[in-house]
């Protein structure tokens, strides 16, 4: 850093301050192609980067996958190629550049030749000039226990749970950990599930893996400065886990400073943009990790197949940081709220009743001590899946800690929450106090108010009694749901966050209940 400052001083002396400012205009420009336009993948991520002073350029919305249209890989690539020479770094989703988006990577009917051509085109991105850093993130197709169209092939509506079980048993068979009873169950599923469905699922997954293997060449050749591979929803025994083990063998042969492979998908853009910011700024932030009492870092969260301690370390490396065991060296403390027993239940479970335990008190006390020592602290709340720990959020606000954090994340899977909190936390030092507070407000209103509380309340009081679907709601249903959601969030959150809650709107951008978008009016 001292050398960089010396060079800048020489430039100021020789050219004058205004010339240096003009010469550096645009030198904090990042190009970003997200998975799709869901708030966590797009708006929240870009907003975080801009709050930290980065100029993030994104493609026109019509090129990006949404709830009602696929992304356009050809137009996305043309947009990148035209601008690549002006950027410091390019962060792109290969799922968007190859398939059109995350959902399209699961549901497409593209021929192998098209996928191969698009992957090879992505490998040549540096040839467009300007020598930007090229950061690519991709995903291994998930193994959902229960999901259906339009986010999966239509046959998942009937066969999804049995396809998941089939994959889990095949994984056990491959690991030689299958019992005699499970062998019989496997044979029965293979006979029951239509062969055409099994063949379509196997071919789709095989093409996904083959395309990902092509991208590994970008790491070998240096065409990619970094490749981040995420495992979308998985489990210790699943088809995704089976594929990941085979992919891991290939990944281990590549330099770890240019590739990482761990659980999660929606947080990957945030993680790599954070890495880009660190590398362009010539920084390697040190991160100290602390886990709640109990199972702590040994926890294997729901929807994932790695211990959370491993996941945390891998996320830190991918985000451009370095784990440290010495608190005094840390630029950021990543405090991870894990369940005492190591079992992550759903946030909608009645157990998540807000009763503050000794474990929660001790965890928040530790966070307070880090703050008192002048450390930036990001809290990754992974005690529950798909929403916040009500007791933790309650204690954070009662102790006055909630608004002092650098970042908070408690949404969706553990990897999603951890990666997003880490990325925002690393960026927070460059944010104005007002911007930091706004980003925290959004996370509390989304992860805690909506996901852990109001979403299920809306299901019980509106969606299910009217026999409405959870997704693909019509316009009238969306408006009715948004009205109930807004009323209930205001009722719940105003007593905690105060009048500022009224400054926000709450909408369902994908016309489904899974995610809400929190925007300032």
Image (cartoon, grey):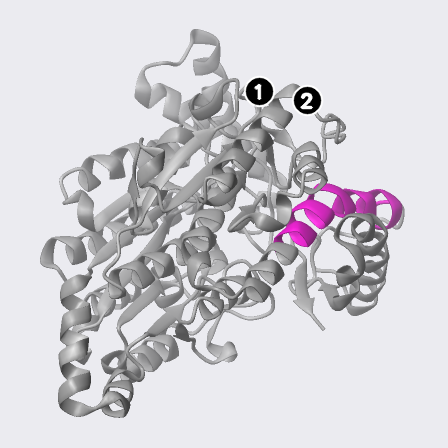
The residue wearing badge 2 is 357
Most frequent secondary structure within the magenta stretch:
helix
Residue at image coords 19%, 76%:
8
Above or below residue 145? Residue 79 is below
Residue 313 numbered mark, or none: none
- The magenta stretch is 443-464
Q: Nearer the viewer, residue 308 or 109?
A: 308
Left or right: 339 with respect to 223? right
Q: Is residue 339 above or below residue 486?
A: above
Residue drawn at x 33%, y 63% as measured from the top left = 277
Residue tagged 1: 340
**With 174 as the anchor, is 410 left or right in this view?**
right
What residue occupies the far left of the structure in this picture? 221
Question: Cβ–Cβ below 8 Å for labels 1 and 2?
Answer: yes
Binning the other alpha carbons within 10 Å of mark 2 as few (below 14), some (14 to 19) or many (20 upward) gives: few
Residue under the image location 54 percent in, 28 percent down: 338
Q: Secondary structure at mark 1?
A: loop
């Amino acid at each position: 850093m001292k050398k960089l400052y010396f060079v800048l001083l020489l430039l100021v002396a020789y050219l004058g301050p205004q010339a240096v400012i003009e010469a550096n205009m645009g030198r904090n420009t990042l190009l970003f192609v997200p998975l799709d336009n869901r708030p966590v993948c797009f708006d929240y991520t870009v907003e975080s980067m801009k709050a930290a002073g980065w100029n993030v350029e994104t493609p026109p919305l019509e090129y990006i996958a949404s709830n009602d249209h696929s992304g356009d890989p050809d137009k996305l690539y043309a947009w990148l190629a035209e601008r690549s020479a002006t950027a410091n770094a390019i962060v792109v989703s290969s799922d968007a550049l190859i398939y059109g988006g995350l959902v399209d990577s699961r549901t497409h009917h593209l021929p192998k030749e098209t996928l191969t051509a698009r992957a090879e085109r992505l490998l040549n991105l540096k040839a467009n000039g300007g020598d930007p850093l090229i950061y690519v993130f991709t995903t291994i197709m998930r193994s959902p226990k229960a999901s259906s169209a339009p986010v999966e092939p239509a046959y998942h509506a009937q066969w999804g749970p049995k396809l998941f079980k089939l994959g889990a048993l095949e994984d056990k068979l491959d690991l030689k950990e299958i019992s005699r009873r499970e062998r019989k169950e496997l044979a029965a599923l293979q006979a029951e599930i239509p062969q055409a469905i099994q063949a379509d699922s196997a071919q789709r997954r095989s093409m996904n893996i083959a395309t990902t293997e092509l991208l590994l060449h970008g790491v070998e050749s240096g065409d990619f400065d970094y490749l981040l591979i995420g495992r979308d929803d998985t489990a210790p025994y699943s088809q995704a886990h089976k594929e990941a083990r085979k992919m891991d063998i290939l990944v281990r042969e590549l330099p770890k400073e240019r590739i990482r492979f761990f659980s999660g998908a929606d947080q990957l853009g945030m993680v790599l943009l954070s890495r880009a910011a660190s590398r362009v700024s010539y920084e390697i932030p040190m991160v100290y990790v602390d886990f709640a009492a109990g199972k702590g870092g040994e926890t294997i969260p729901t929807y994932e197949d790695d211990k959370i301690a491993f996941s945390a370390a891998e996320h830190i490396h991918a985000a451009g940081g370095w784990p440290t065991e010495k608190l005094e060296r840390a630029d950021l403390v990543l405090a991870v709220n894990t369940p005492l027993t190591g079992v992550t239940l759903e946030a909608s479970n009645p157990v998540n009743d807000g009763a503050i335990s000794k474990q929660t008190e001790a965890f928040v006390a530790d966070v307070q001590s880090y703050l008192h020592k002048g450390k930036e602290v990001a809290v990754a709340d992974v005690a529950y899946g798909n929403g916040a720990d009500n007791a933790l959020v309650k204690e954070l606000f009662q102790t006055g800690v909630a608004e002092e954090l650098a970042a908070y994340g408690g949404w969706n899977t553990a990897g999603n929450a951890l990666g997003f909190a880490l990325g925002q936390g690393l960026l927070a030092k460059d944010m104005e106090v007002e911007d930091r507070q706004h980003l925290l407000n959004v996370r509390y209103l989304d992860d805690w108010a909506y996901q852990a509380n109001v979403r299920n309340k809306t299901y019980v009081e509106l969606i299910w009694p009217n026999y409405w679907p959870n997704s693909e709601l019509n316009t009238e249903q969306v408006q009715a749901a948004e009205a109930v959601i807004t009323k209930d969030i205001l009722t719940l959150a105003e007593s905690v966050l105060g009048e500022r809650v009224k400054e926000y709107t709450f909408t369902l951008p994908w016309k489904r209940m899974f995610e809400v978008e929190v925007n300032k009016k």
